[in-house]
Image (cartoon, rainbow, N blue to C red):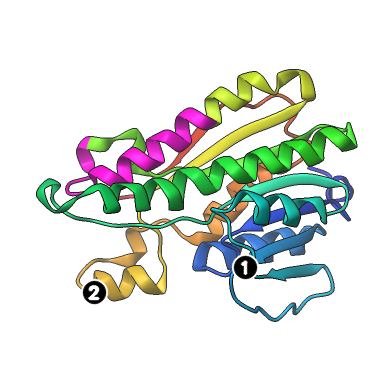
């Protein structure tokens, strides 16, 4: 991939303040892109090519549409924002399943829709990258993750449906499906596990970069498994 292909292109990264999000933003900035990060809370901008927007609610149609309308010449949109929950079936009620669907599926859908509108106005095509998860592809390995697995499986279906729908617009739509990632939160939650066997956030960020690159001219509808070694 030529470094010149990416320099100056504008990309949205939702969830850009989390562990994976920070790694993705750093990698994209290093590649020369201009990153736009929506947030519900104030975030220091830092780098010259990092723009943060305070008060964006990703589950609200108007908030999402307003944010995307202000991003110039949108090339790519990466949707990392989401949530995780574990509970046995008997402990999952209406509120719990709706929460997972809102955090993971609805936010991804609204951002995809707003990004596509912006890309169509530009007329140059673009790239969308969503984040699924291993339990979406292998739900039998997601013990006590029924609501989470279902919400991420919906992200997979959305990715593949949009990839077909947006062919004529030259907008490629793909997803990554990480297994357990090496983050401070996961280390705290699983202190007895070996984090060296987990997926690094830097590896996931590299995969995102490859998928949004103009050098990717054909791959669309793919859900890339990024599984830990154990």
Q: Main secondary structure of the magenta part?
A: helix
Residue that numbered label 2 is attached to: 191
Q: Relative to the observer, which residue lies in front, 140 or 210? A: 140
Q: Relative to the observer, which residue lies in front, 70 or 20? A: 70
**What residue is drawn where x is 29% and y is 57%?**
85
141 relative position to 156: left or right: left
Whether residue 166 is in magenta: the answer is: no
Give the answer, above or below, for where 53 lies relative to 31: below
Residue 179 visible in the snapshot: no
**What residue is drawn where x is 20% and y is 49%?**
93
Crowd band around label 2 with a 10 angstrom C-alpha radius: few (<14), some (14–19), many (20+): few
What span is colored magenta in the figure? Answer: 140-158
Marking on residue 39: 1
Q: Nearer the viewer, mark 2 or mark 1?
A: 1
**What residue is drawn where x is 77% and y is 58%?**
31
Whether residue 147 is in magenta: the answer is: yes
Give the answer, above or below, for where 120 lies relative to 89: above
Q: Residue 20 location, x and y as percent?
A: 52, 62
Residue extending furthest toward the front:
62
Residue 173 visible in the snapshot: yes
Q: Secondary structure at mark 2?
A: loop
């Amino acid at each position: 991939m030529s470094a010149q292909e990416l320099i100056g292109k504008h990309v949205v990264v939702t969830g850009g303040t989390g562990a994976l999000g920070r790694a993705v933003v750093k990698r994209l900035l290093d590649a020369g892109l201009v990153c736009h990060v929506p947030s519900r809370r104030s975030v220091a901008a830092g780098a010259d090519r990092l723009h943060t927007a305070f008060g964006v609610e990703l589950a609200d149609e108007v908030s999402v549409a307003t944010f995307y309308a202000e991003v110039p010449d949108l090339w790519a949109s990466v949707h990392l924002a989401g949530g995780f929950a574990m509970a046995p079936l008997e402990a999952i009620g209406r509120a719990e399943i709706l929460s997972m669907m809102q955090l993971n599926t609805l936010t991804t859908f609204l951002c995809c829709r707003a990004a596509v509108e912006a890309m169509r106005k530009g007329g140059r095509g673009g790239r969308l990258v969503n984040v699924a998860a291993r339990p979406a592809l292998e739900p039998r390995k997601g013990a006590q993750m029924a609501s989470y697995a279902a919400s991420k499986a919906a992200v997979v279906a959305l990715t593949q449906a949009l990839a077909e729908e947006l062919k004529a617009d030259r907008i490629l739509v793909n997803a990554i499906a990480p297994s357990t990632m090496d983050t401070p939160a996961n280390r705290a939650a699983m202190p007895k596990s070996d984090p060296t066997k987990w997926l690094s956030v830097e590896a996931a960020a590299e995969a995102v970069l490859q998928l949004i690159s103009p050098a990717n001219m054909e791959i669309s509808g793919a859900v890339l498994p990024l599984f830990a070694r154990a």
